[in-house]
Amino acid sequence: MNLGIDGKRALVLGGNKGLGRGVAARLAAEGVVVAAVGRDEQALEATVADLRGTSPASFGIRADLGDAADVAAMLARVDRDLGGVDILLLNGGGPPPFGADETDAARWHRQFDALFLSGLGIAAHVLPGMRARHWGRILVVSSNSVREPIKGLTASNALRAAVAGWAKSLAGEVAAEGVTVNLLLAGRLDTERTKGLDRLDAEARGVDTKVIAAESQAEIPIGRYGTPDEFGAVAAFLASDLASYVTGTAIPIDGGLARAII
């Protein structure tokens, strides 16, 4: 199936590992020139080496999205070396677990800046070019916590809901200009984030991590954790010409875990 995005340009945040790498790999396989962004330089180099196997012009940018100077330098590099962004993947690390009774304002502000304001600013930077070309795809990596809050992940539950509200609003504003905006609701996928949460649960209960992982996967109708490649496949479709009539949606990629109908 030809997705019609050969030669398009993508900025993939968190593209050096996990779900971001899965998306970057799928886009590169379709001929997209990918600028992959990440903090871990070693992982970034390994990812770019793989991407260039199918998309030779792809490159990496080492940046901490929580650092305003890094973000400004990243956008300048993208403007110079990519010449514009057709596909944007907003993706960042999930907030640390803490309870709903947390009242440390500074802690909340840090998470809000990282998960909400940073992505909004990056999207605002690339949107004028998308609108001028009457073609653009903005994909937001989110979580099933938007629909069903996850115990202990208060910041994720609250802030991802805020991002979802922003994305839905933006989708309505730019749809007629050929720009789509969609959320990817990640369930339990085989990433360092999932493994880390499994370790925390295992430590709290005093059991082996394998016990937690087995119990967690038993709750998923498909019976296993998903892979970054499976996640990337859905993202690549939503980034394609074929998905031009899909916008303002929140797509669960969770093996049937979510109980909500909509």
Image (cartoon, rainbow, N blue to C red):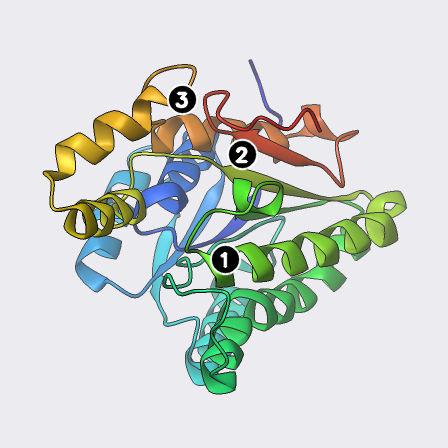
Q: Is residue 129 left or right of residue 237?
A: right
Task: Return the residue at label 1.
Answer: 156
Local packing at callout 3 (Cα closer than 10 Å; few below 14, some 14-19, many 20+) is: some
In the drawing, what numbered circle is on residue 243? none
N-term-proximal mark, 2 vs 3: 3
* Res 85 quadrant in image: bottom right
Task: Return the residue at label 2.
Answer: 235
CA gap between label 2 and label 3 equals 21 Å
Residue positioned 60% across, 72% down in the render:
117
Residue 48 spot, x, y in % from top left: 28, 48
N-term-proximal mark, 1 vs 3: 1
Q: Where does the C terminus fall, quadrant-wise?
A: top right
Task: Return the residue at label 3.
Answer: 220
Residue positioned 39% across, 55% down in the render:
14
Residue type, mark 3 in image: Ile
Q: Is residue 93 left or right of residue 198?
A: right
Residue positioned 41% across, 55% down in the render:
152
Residue 128 spot, x, y in % from top left: 75, 63
Badge 1 vs badge 3, beta-carbon distance below 8 Å? no
* Res 144 quadrant in image: top right
Residue type, mark 2 in image: Ala
For mark 3, give the secondary structure: loop
For mark 2, give the secondary structure: helix
Q: Is residue 216 left or right of residue 81?
A: left
Residue 170 spot, x, y in % from top left: 78, 55
Note whether 69 is above or below 173 in the view shown.
below
